[in-house]
Each structure stands twice: as structure tokens, then as C-alpha cells.
Image (cartoon, helix red, strand yellow):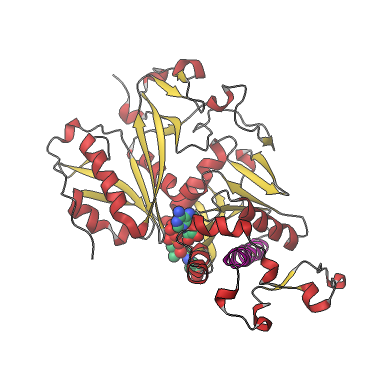
Amino acid sequence: MEDQSCSSVEIDDFDSYDHNSPWALDIGGTLIKLVYFSREDGCLENSFGNSVRLEEVGLETSSKNYPILDGKLHFKKFQTSKINECLDFIESKLLQGSCCRHQEVSGKKKLIIKATGGGAYKYADLFKEKFGVTFDKEDEMNSLVSGANFLLKAVPCEAFTYMEGRKDFVQINSSDLFPYLLVNIGSGISMIKVVGDGKFERVSGTSLGGGTLLGLGMLLTKCQSFDDLLEMSHKGDNRNIDMLVSDIYGSDYSKIGLSARTIASSFGKVIFDNKELKDYKKEDIARSLLRMISNNLAQIAYLIAMWHGKLKRIIFGGSFTRSHEYIMETISDGVEYWSKGETKAMFLRHEGFLGALGAFKSYEKHGLGSLMGHHLSEQSPVASPRPQLEQKSNGPLLVESTDAESVGCCILGSDTMKRT
Ligand SMILES: Nc1ncnc2c1ncn2[C@@H]1O[C@H](COP(=O)(O)OP(=O)(O)OP(=O)(O)O)[C@@H](O)[C@H]1O
Ligand SMILES: CC(C)(CO)[C@@H](O)C(=O)NCCC(=O)O
């Protein structure tokens, strides 16, 4: 039963709300992702906590007579099973008057939050009853693609490859971005062929995803959380659980390209061990599970990329990778192995927020203006890692590049917001 313990928030003066405080939610099967904008007056903070005047970074506050709303874009996650924590957070922001935007619908002002993911449907009534907030629903796949395109085109140091312990940033030229395969690893996995802005097809999917890793992990290792499971996997050795080619051949099987270390059968060693679950180290199980799911999805992703026009770029999103080195390494190795070195897996720094960002971006349709940013990451001599440029990007960047939970950004006003 849903917890109704929070008192509902009374909103009696809509005009006191800043109509430029857009919020967007992506409510998935496992996690809720929230992206929201908060205004700051006249200056932005760069990644290093220094204040920067907009003029200093090449943006004039009165540019073209359109307002520029400067502030921060915040990224937050909650567990879907603990949706009340998300509700409490939103309630606290509502009470501060800093959440949502209002929109006039048939003469009445309504509080609106953009929402995507399955929960946009499942929890719409809960939000309505609790706060009087209406979900303006955005399609999940559309939001994922819009968020990914936005990050790939606009944010420096967003996409990177991860091989042999090395992270190399890749700035992709916008004119050479498409087509690519977006593999969104959430609870389940969606594979989307993206051929342009708003042009895509969900070409495949698999139920063996992040939820499978966490679900099996909780059953087999009694871990309490995803972080626990990742932590355990660091210390484990999958060779105590997995059957390797060397376990079967005594050596490699080089004639068909299998090294001695290749996993011939995930969890395959268990069948001969005559042991019980408690006899295995949970760290080894965690490692084995992580390799099994990551290898499998890398292989499927590669096959789908080939099947749908030999797509050279495979970009992995979703909260599963969490910039976790071993996961990225395993996925990269899988793609490298199956493509015989022709294709590289790419990852995104804001990987978990594609859907929420896409939903957030959709405010543009309603005349809110464009999410913009600037070269703030270039402000400091110790700035973020330099991108390995496929081609140098130019033009305005949209969001300050940083791993932090919030990033400096601004919204460039549109015609409907034009100053008089
Ligand atoms: N803090 C966390 N708690 C639980 N799972 C996590 C966490 N961090 C990362 N994960 C992993 O990420 C997965 C969820 O990813 P994501 O948020 O992209 O999916 P979702 O939107 O909840 O699912 P779906 O899109 O299938 O509805 C989990 O299944 C788990 O493997
Ligand atoms: C159902 C969704 C789209 C919800 O995000 C996702 O969990 C998914 O793509 N699952 C895989 C379903 C399948 O294609 O078999």
C-alpha cells in the first residue's frame, strides 16, 4: 500500500512560484532519476567552486534581448521501492517554492512535472493526490534518445571509451554522430538504433539486465545493495565459479580463437564441486555474476549493431555501469572480442540520466527556451580530462562538464520569454 503519511502541500499562490524551475522525473523499474534546474543570480559556479560571471564565459545576460536563466542542473536518484523518499524531497522543495513549473491549462494554473519511464504511468495518481502535481508524460524511448543526443552533441568530456584501465574521452562531431546503437542498461535492456534527432527505432531488448544482476546477486550473496555487490565483486575471483576453456581443454583452443582464460561456461564449475552455496565466497559469486551479465549484454549489443546496418558506434547508457571500471572493462572487452577490434564500446558520464534529461529537454517544446552551457570546463588549468577529439567541437556547449551531482548551466530564453 502506498504511504500517505506526508501531508499534502497547499499551493495557494501559484504566481509566487518561479515558472522557470523545470523538473523532470524518469521513474524506472529500479531507480527514480530526477533532474531539476535551480536558478542562481548573475553568476555560475564552475567545477572548482569558483564563481564565474556569465559575461566572462562569453554569454551576455542580455543576449538578443532573450533572458538567460543561469543556475544549476541537479541530478538525483532514489530507489523506486522507496518512492516516499522522492516524494518527501519533492515536498520539501514545494514548500520552499522551488519545485515544478506551472502551466495554464484551460484557464487554470496547474503544477506540472515532466515524467517518463514506466512510473510516469504507474505513479501519476499518487503524485496528483499527494501534491496536485500533474505528470506531463514523455515517451521513455524518445526521452532516452533525446537525452543521449543532447549529451553527445553538447557536453565536452561526456563520451569515453574504457580499455585496459584507461579512460579516453571522445568528443564526437555532431555532423558525424549518427547512426549509433544506444544500449540502455536499466532493470531490463533496450537497444535503440538512433539515426537522427527524434529519429530512432527500438530494435531489440533483453530481460537479462541490471535487475537480473542485482536480483541474482541479492539471492546468492545476500548483498543489501548494488554498491555492496560491486564492492564484493572487486575482491572476488570468478575462476572459482566459472568453467574456463582451460578447465575443459587443459590449455587454449586457439584453432577457434579461444584463449585458455576464456569463460567457457558461466557458473559451470559449480556442477562438479559438490558444494553448497555457503561454501562459495560471495565475492567470487558477485564477480562471476557481473561478468556473466556484462559479457552477455556486450555480445547481444554487438550482434544487434551488426544486424542493423553494421553500426560502428555502440553507446551504453543506463544506471548499470555507474562508471564502474570492471563493468565497463568487461563490456568493452566483449565488444572488442566479438567485433574483432572493429567496434569500441562507448560510455557516458551522465549515463543514468538520459531519460530524465530527455524529458527535461522536452520543456523546450513549451517555449521554456534551450538548455545551454558554456566552456566552463575550460576555465581552470586543472580542468576535466581533455577530450580525445574525433573532430574539434565548436559553438556553445550546453552543460558544464563535471561528475558532480549538479552542474552549472543556463537556459537561453525563447521567443515566448523575450524581454520587452
Ligand atoms: N543505487 C542503486 N540501486 C539499485 N540498482 C542500481 C543502483 N545503481 C545502479 N544500479 C543498477 O542499475 C539498474 C537500474 O538502472 P536504471 O536506473 O537505468 O533502470 P530503471 O530505469 O530503473 O529500469 P527500467 O528502465 O528497466 O525501468 C539496476 O538494476 C542495477 O543493476
Ligand atoms: C520495459 C523497459 C522498456 C522499461 O524501461 C525495459 O525494462 C526493457 O527494455 N526491458 C527489456 C524487455 C525486452 O525487450 O525483453
Q: Position of residue 323 (x, y in %)?
A: 57, 48
Residue 366 in sight: yes
Q: Is residue 398 left or right of 289 when viewed as pictured?
A: left
Q: Position of residue 43 (x, y in %)?
A: 41, 20
Q: Is residue 339 left or right of 58 when viewed as pictured?
A: right
Q: State yes or no: residue 210 in magenta.
A: no
Q: Position of residue 393 (x, y in %)?
A: 62, 31
Q: Where, by quadrant of the figure, is residue 409 drawn?
A: top left
Residue 311 in sight: no
Q: Where, by quadrant of the figure, is residue 10 drawn?
A: top left
State the residue in front, 107 or 128.
Answer: 128
Residue visible at 54% across and 33% down in the picture:
401
Q: State yes or no: residue 290 in magenta.
A: yes
Chain part drawn in magenta: 282-306
Q: Quadrant of the C terminus?
A: top left
Q: Is residue 223 above or below residue 243?
A: above
Q: Is residue 45 above or below residue 340?
A: above
Residue visible at 67% across and 63% down in the picture:
237
Farthest residue, direction front: 279
Residue visible at 16% across and 48% down in the picture:
8
Q: Quadrant of the N terminus?
A: bottom left
